[in-house]
Amino acid sequence: MSHGLEVSMNGFETAFASRSEPSWHLLGVTFEGDVTTEEMLRLAYLADWDIQLVPVEVPGVSPDRFAKEQYATVRTNPFDGELDALGFVGGRYKVSQNEEILGFGDALLDGGRWETAGSINGGTRIFASLALDHELVIDPSGVADVVNSYLLVTTSHDGSSPIMALNTPVRAVCQNTLNLAISGAKQAFKVRHTTTLEGKIAVAREALGIADDYFAKFGTFATALFETPMDVGQFIDMAKVLYPEPEGESKNAATRWENKITLLGDIFTGTGDGPNTSAGVSGTAWGGFNAMTEALDWYRKPRKENPESVLSAASGFDPVINQEKARITKAFASLV
């Protein structure tokens, strides 16, 4: 399953909820309008996991003979009520329930609304996104290219990742996740663990302040790219700088490179088999930049060792894709 979403044993239920329309493989629950955090948790099968730390037992080994404390993070499966072991952690690991992780969203709902939520990789990682009340319109009297602002929250239940939030602009016409490292702006940050209402409000205010600053700086960057002309030849030259032609490799490698450059050119000009998402911007560096990020988000195969990587990239939490987007951003930033 290349989508990586958690699916029940019978295959009929998926731990994913999305407002208006499912984003991945037409799976999960679709809802209309606004929902509360409690409702979002229930729709995405994230409620009542009741995650516990259970001491690891090894037959024949006394607990006091362990070199260090080891616990399994155990949850109640949201589909069948059975217990699942999600991972193994040390004695200092602090359990966070999904209700607590998404809880600070309650204080954000006046300035945004829940968009998606779900779990991947067998429940070891959960994610949720809030659509914020930020909208960037590039060339409002002309092309009117809209970019919306999202705050994505994620964590793992196997000890591999803290609770993180990520500012992610999304271009409306193609749903590119433009999760970019913008100079001078804070993009990703750890979310403080808190259970009090006052604490949640403080975290929410901090998140909104960071989002405001990031989106303002992103708007300056995007507008500058839009005002920078770029023709097809210049775009292909940029593509070849970012993805140099392989030397001394197999014929298959050369063919893959040629196909990649052709695909990028087709996206930039809107002449490929996919939807034309470049109308009105294909003659600009903004169009070129989006062609590059669109190829990463929507035209690549999942890595064999990480089948949920497509979902992670679209969610903004794939470190490999984030690194690649940082490379692209740096290249295009040099033009403005």
Image (cartoon, rainbow, N blue to C red):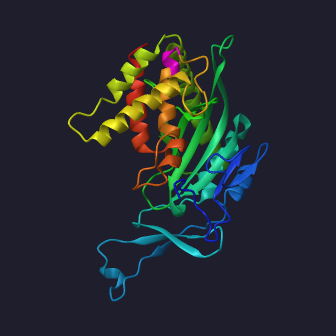
Instruction: Give the residue displayed 60% in from the left and 34% down from the top.
Output: 175
Q: Main secondary structure of the magenta part?
A: helix
Is 222 in front, or is 270?
Answer: 270
Q: Give the answer, above or below, for where 269 lies relative to 139.
A: below
Residue 286 colored in magenta in the image: yes
Residue 113 sits in quarter? top right
**Magenta segment:** 283-287
Residue 142 seen in the figure: yes
Residue 4 colored in magenta in the image: no
Q: Residue furthest right?
A: 33
Q: Quadrant of the C terminus?
A: top left
Q: Give the answer, above or below, for where 287 lies relative to 78.
A: above
Q: Residue 181 appears at what percent x and percent y?
A: 44, 30
Instruction: Give the residue displayed 43% in from the left and 54% down from the top.
Output: 306
Is 302 in front, or is 51?
Answer: 302
Is 49 in front, or is 144?
Answer: 144
Q: Residue 162 appears at what percent x and percent y?
A: 47, 51
Instruction: Give the residue displayed 46% in from the left and 49% down from the top.
Output: 302
Q: Residue 315 appears at what percent x and percent y?
A: 54, 43
